[in-house]
Structures are given as C-alpha cells and as structure tokens.
Image (cartoon, rainbow, N blue to C red):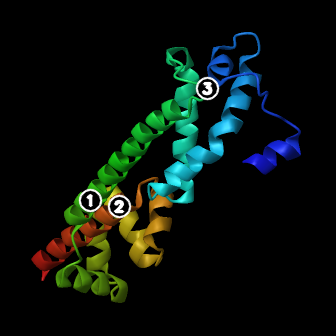
Amino acid sequence: MVSLRRLRGVADPPDRSDAALLADTLRPADSFTTFYRRHDAALLRFAASRGLDVHAAADVVAETFAAALQHRHRYKPQGESARLWLLGIAVRKIADHHRDETRHLRRQNRLRDELGALTQADVDSYEQLVAGSDTETIDALSDLPTPQQDAIRARVLEDRDYADVAVALGLSEAAARKQVSRGLAALRSQLGRHR
C-alpha cells in the first residue's frame, strides 16, 4: 500500500534487492518490514483475483508472509524481485484455504445429515411438553440423562434459542440440537409407554 508507506515516511531503499532484505541478519525486522511493504498490496490483489473475500485474502497474505519469514533462508535469488517466490507460497496457501473450506462444508453437511430434520413426532412431543405440566411429563423428563434434561429445559421450558442453549451447556450449537432432539425422542418413547 504505497500511500501508507509515504504516510509512515518509510522509503524502500532502491539499492537493496529483495534477496538482500531477506538475507539481512543485522536488522532482520526492519529489512523484512521493508520487504513486506514492497509486496503486500500485490499479494492482496493476487488473493482477491483468486476469488477470496477480504478476510480470507488478508489471512492468505498473512500466512504467506509468515511462511516467507520462516523460510527466507531458502530463497534463491532469480533477479531483483522475490515476488514470484512469494506468489508461489501464496498459491499453496490459497489451495490450503480452499481445502479447509471444503472440509468445513463437508463437516457441516455431515452434521446436518446426522441431526436430520425434526419429525412430526418430535414436534408433537415438544408441544405436549410445552402444554403439559402434568406429573407424568415431569417424571418422564427427570428420567432422561442430565445433558438431555438440561437441553430440553433450556430450549423448551425456558424457550431459549439453540445458540443460548449451547453457551449455557458448554456445547456447540449442533451438539445442543442433538441433545434436544435425542431427549425429545426419548421423552416421546417414555410417554408412549405410559399411555
């Protein structure tokens, strides 16, 4: 970001190549800062051109420079600029990002499939629990495992949304949904036996 460099009063020394900046052992922090400022805007544009949103692009640029800093001793000069070397690192970081996104989506889909949609029986037992405060329903609720009891009490009786239930129980939102769903199914089963 050229304008930021000018505002900070930092000028890239024209006589120092990228290779010299990366190899500097006397003032490595200053040299790497100069190196970063030379290439950060180009890397950000490159990441954006690969379809990443601003947050993902910023993450990729940060990871690219972190890898460059860690492995600067591996840089083999091929001219004045190390931009191609940085772009090679960025390509790998973008691929890592896409792989992570794909894994995350697969996990979400798998979890959604495991949880499944509420059945009509789940809805009926929910309505029965909300409407009924009879001792039979309360007894059936108290027979459930504690995590399911707590989840049903928070979601059904206290009418809290799943995000609040998850925080209150120290679970992920998906795990809170699963506890409520399993608890309602067990409650329905118990109530069905008693009728």
Horizontally, residue 90 falls left or right of residue 14, namely left
Asked if the residue at tag 2 contacts the one at tag 1, i.e. Cβ–Cβ closer than 8 Å, the answer is yes
Horizontally, residue 191 falls left or right of residue 153, namely left
Instruction: Between label 1 and label 2, give the one nearer the viewer.
Output: 1
The residue pinned by badge 2 equals 174
In this view, 164 is above or below 85: below
Query: In terms of image quadrants, where is residue 106?
Result: bottom left
Disc 2 crowd rating (10 Å Cα; few below 14, some 14-19, many 20+) is some
Horizontally, residue 92 falls left or right of residue 113, namely right
In this view, 181 is above or below 52: below
The residue pinned by badge 3 equals 80
> Residue 173 or 100: which is nearer the viewer?
100
Query: In terms of image quadrants, where is residue 166?
Result: bottom left
Q: Amino acid at mark 3?
A: Glu
Q: Amino acid at mark 1?
A: Leu
Query: In terms of image quadrants, where is residue 127?
Result: bottom left
Residue 98's spot in the image, x, y percent? 36, 50
User: What whole-number distance in Å separates the C-alpha atoms at marks 2 and 3?
Assistant: 52 Å
Residue 56 visible to an observer of this rendering: no
The residue pinned by badge 1 equals 111
